[in-house]
Amino acid sequence: PILMKKMDVPPPPPSGTDVDEETRIAVADLITMNRKLRRAVKEREAERSSMRGETEKLKKELANVSEFSQQQAEDILVLQERLKAAEQISKMTKQSLGSMDNLDGEHAPPHQNFSSSKGKRKIHHPLPSELHLVDPGAGTIRRGQMTRQTSMATNDVLDTIPIIPIDALAQKFVDLYKDPTSSIDYMTSSQFAEDIIRLCGAAKEIFEAESRCLHMESPVYVFGDTHGNLEDLHFFSDNLWRLGMNLCAGKFLFLGDYVDRGMSSLEVVTYLIALKTLYPDKIFMLRGNHETRDVNGWEEHYGDRSFIAQCKNRFGEQMGEEVWEELNCVFDRLPLAGVIDRDIFCIHGGVPRPLPGTPPDASRLDMIQQIPAVSGINPPYDHEEEHLRQMASECIWSDPAGEDQEESGELGDDGYGDSPRGGGTICFGNKSLDDFLKLHNLSYVMRAHEAHAHGVSLSKKARCFTVFSTSKDHNQGSAAICGCILVDFERMEVITRSPAYRNQYVHRRDSLSVRSLPASEFEAREKVGLITELDESDEEYDDGEYDDEEYDDEMVGQN
């Protein structure tokens, strides 16, 4: 509040008295100032009164929320009691039926049938096991077979369980992924583009709220690059979460590079983002070097297989660039690293160097946490500090040093050196890996970023795993397979795609399955990546390494 003393206004001079003109003006100014101050005090008092009213209103709303939460807690307790009662009834029913079985075994009634093939008795219940459910609204009776799941007591309990609402839009993308051939018209429509933009809006909030370095407990399935390969992703979904991720015991960690190269980049990345929206504590997505605008917008290098070209070919120039930008805004918010069971460091590229000027024992995991939750990296936003942008760039770009580099002495005293990729990227050797694992009390590094024909490879004295979850578009040959790793407490299991696996949606151009298709449908399927080139076309694309002349320093943003 404004404190002020009441000002005494001098009385007017008696008539006939000469008053100095300056004094008259000063008195008038004082009177005017006094009025302004009084007006300001009144306005401030009105503001305080309004604020008090808002405070009271907020207190009432808080009380209502607290009351509602308490009511919900009470409802949950009641529901738990009902579930316990239903379980007890089910248990008593099982015991009763078991007693009847024992009795029947001693005195087999004449109406029992026996199966000669299996040697087991087939017991017929003496009474018809029918369930009659009355719909009070419609006044109808629904008759069905009585089972343990549809007993009267269980049915009453199931009616009281609230249906958990899910994001209908995200579920729409998941359903689309399960059978893409039934929605080709939608996948090439402007409505699909608008739905992607809406999905991005929900996903950005989820990713931005996550730590830059995640911490999780096993079991965890770890996946490498997917690069728009819908066929290999279908293999994993068919075998690892066929009934849905929410029904699996483990978590799922993807190490980045979801777009470019493969022609189904839009389907792959929107499917994973939709799963993240539905199950944010079940699936986790890290950022790869292809989740930057400089790379997935490099149309001159990747041509029609670049992510931006796929967006424009699908939706047109303007809408395509809008979808591309919205998805890149999601990529800007992806975490950069993760740690499983406080023992396994997971990242797309590799071990980053410590920040300049930090002590040797400073935690690099804490340094990664300092990277802004919204980071462009390549190119950076104005708010990104150069030393943190540098660390983020090394997280998504670095590689293990080759044996020839280790033996030739190309690496520095800290165990780091220049990567054969060029463009200022770095590689980490045995010493830098030893120092990093020892400093953070870790045992292994799991990364992606490099293509391998067997899906998973080991390096650096079996302490560095490289996971690659796509078998196409990386010059690995027609026999290449994709893989992932299951981290299950003290056990690690490599899972690779069997050569015998055949999906029902993605086919090669020369496949008999698509030769009978009309030309219009063939073209539509090809446009959305469901018809791929022949295996020979795989030789046209490099293995992920860039020549120094082809990829300049400015692209990666290194010094």
Image (cartoon, helix red, strand yellow):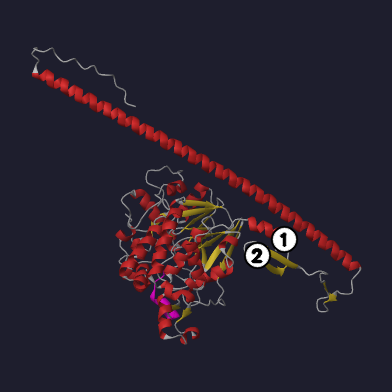
In magenta segment, residue 540: yes
Q: Which of 227 and 386 is in front in this view?
A: 227
Image quadrant in which you'd find residue 409: bottom left
Where residue 122 sits: x, y (%)? 82, 73
* Mark 2 vs 1: CB contact within 8 A: no
Q: Mark 2 points at which residue?
A: 139
Q: Which of 141 and 313 is in front in this view?
A: 141
Residue type beneath disc 1: Met
In magenta segment, residue 339: no
Where residue 462 sits: x, y (%)? 54, 60
Extreme residue in the bottom direction? 516
10 Å neighbourhood of mark 2: few (<14), some, or many (≥20)? few
Q: Mark 1 points at which residue?
A: 152
Image quadrant in which you'd find residue 50: top left
- Left or right of 489, for residue 534: left
Q: Residue 404 carries which label?
A: none
Above or below for 475 versus 275: below
How many numbered marks appear?
2
**Quarter of the rendering occupied by the N terminus:** top left
Residue at 68% from the left image edge and 68% from the top image edge: 142
Which region of the structure is painted magenta? 534-544
Residue type beneath disc 2: Gly
Q: Which of 364 and 232 is in front in this view?
A: 232
